[in-house]
Amino acid sequence: MIDTTGVLVVGASAAGLSTVEALRRHGYRDKVTVLGAEPCLPYDRPPLSKQILAGAWEPYRTQLRSPAALAGLDAEFILGDPARNLDLGTHTVCTDQGRVVRARRRGRVRPARRGRARRPRQ
């Protein structure tokens, strides 16, 4: 089965969140889907690696937006399923779990990925 969306944002980090916010701010009202490799909503990475691992913060403090703010964006977040293949000809992305998501028109797949989060060695 192929899921169809208006805009497909690949990457659920701060960059992906900013992309969705900019689309909505500029009046885009069609469906927006965000694919993220990690199983959690967008969070601030530097505090994760410092304050949380040091025990100074609880994990919820790194969330970039409240659940209400994210709900207000009216975007579908598909988390914990990394994008693996991008077909520019059909505007589709296939994920590790076999999901296929297609943007309705060319130019509507937005890569918004930065680096990968790394876990410290134990």
Image: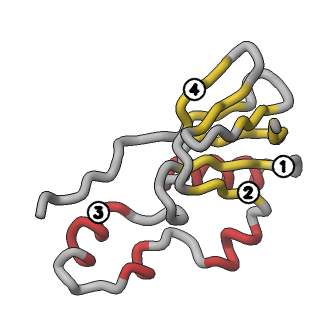
Q: Nearer the viewer, residue 14 or 98?
A: 98
Q: Mark 2 points at which residue?
A: 76
Report which quarter residue 101 is drawn in: top right
Spatial CA span between label 1 and label 2: 8 Å
Disc 2 packing (10 Å; few <14; some 14–19; many ≥20) = some
Amino acid of disc 3: Pro
Q: Which of 99 and 55 is in front in this view?
A: 99
Q: Mark 4 points at which residue?
A: 85
Amino acid of disc 4: Asn
- Residue 99's tag is none
Tell me which residue sits at (29%, 63%) in the image. Answer: 46
- Residue 31's tag is 1
Q: Nearer the viewer, mark 4 or mark 2?
A: 4
Q: Where is residue 10 in the image (x, y as percent from the top left)?
A: 59, 40
Quadrant including the C terminus: bottom left
- Residue 46's tag is 3
